Amino acid sequence: MAGSLGSFVGNPCDLALVRMQADTSLPEAERRNYKNVMDAFTRIVSEEGVTALWRGAVPTMMRASALNVSMLVSYETAKDMATKAMGPGASSFQIQFGSSMIAAVATAVGSLPFDNIKTKMQKQKAGADGKMPYASVADCITKSMAKEGVAGFWAGLPTYYFRVGPHAIITLLAAEKYRTLFGIGQTKKN
């Protein structure tokens, strides 16, 4: 829930980032040519309306949820399995680091389809007929699958992994350190 809420609040910044990055790959005639983030915000509001700042918010929130669930569930599962397999004498850091590496892969695989849909929704521009290419998240998913196939949802996986993998590893190891420092989730010994 926290990831979804944070994504909703931060969507205008994410929208500006995606559009500014996409400009470099577009033909000059199709570029938005935002000067900076504030120019992007101002122009989006004046040209498309204030609600356009939240274009792609639903898939952004879905991505955040998928990312957090993929990361946390896979980490705890891997950590439990490694602890059982390696026994009580195993280094807790090795278990945590290995588990975070596994979770990083699961995070990338589990959240990339949502990231791809989010990016398509945020980059879209109205055509000559005034219609947007995608009417909704479901429409974007259907058209993407028809055009690219199921594997298209994972296009760019290696690059995406190098973006979210380190984030997952650092987040999980920092959370473990926090738990240890403050005794969270540990049972008290009599």
Image: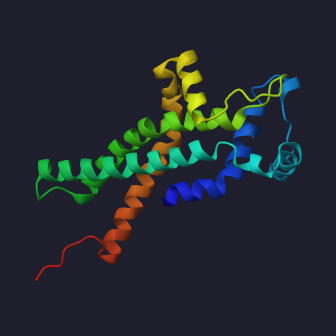
Residue at image x 49%, y 28%? Answer: 154
Of 138 and 190, which appears nearest the observer? 138
Q: In the rendering, at what x and y percent does residue 177 appear? A: 36, 66
Which colour assignment does the render follow? rainbow
Position of 171 with respect to 23 (left or right) is left
Image position of 69 (left or right of 33): left
Q: Which of 60 and 185 is in front in this view?
A: 60
- Which residue is rendered at x = 33% and y = 42% of the image? 102
Q: Which of 22 and 53 is in front in this view?
A: 53
Left or right of residue 59, residue 49 in this image: right
Residue at the location (36% across, 45% down)? 103
Image point (83%, 43%), residue name:
48
Give coordinates of residue 114: x percent, y percent.
52, 37
Can residue 110 be seen from the camera position used here? yes
Residue 151: horizontal and vertical position, in percent? 46, 21
Number of marks present in the image shown = 0
Q: In the picture shown, does residue 33 fall above or below 36?
A: above
Q: In which quarter of the image is the C terminus?
A: bottom left
Residue 179 or residue 14, whichever sits in front: 14
When asked about the image quadrant of residue 189, the answer is bottom left
**Residue pushed farthest bottom?**
190
Task: Give residue 45's position: percent from left, percent from top.
Answer: 84, 49
The reply to whether residue 94 is visible in this rendering is: no
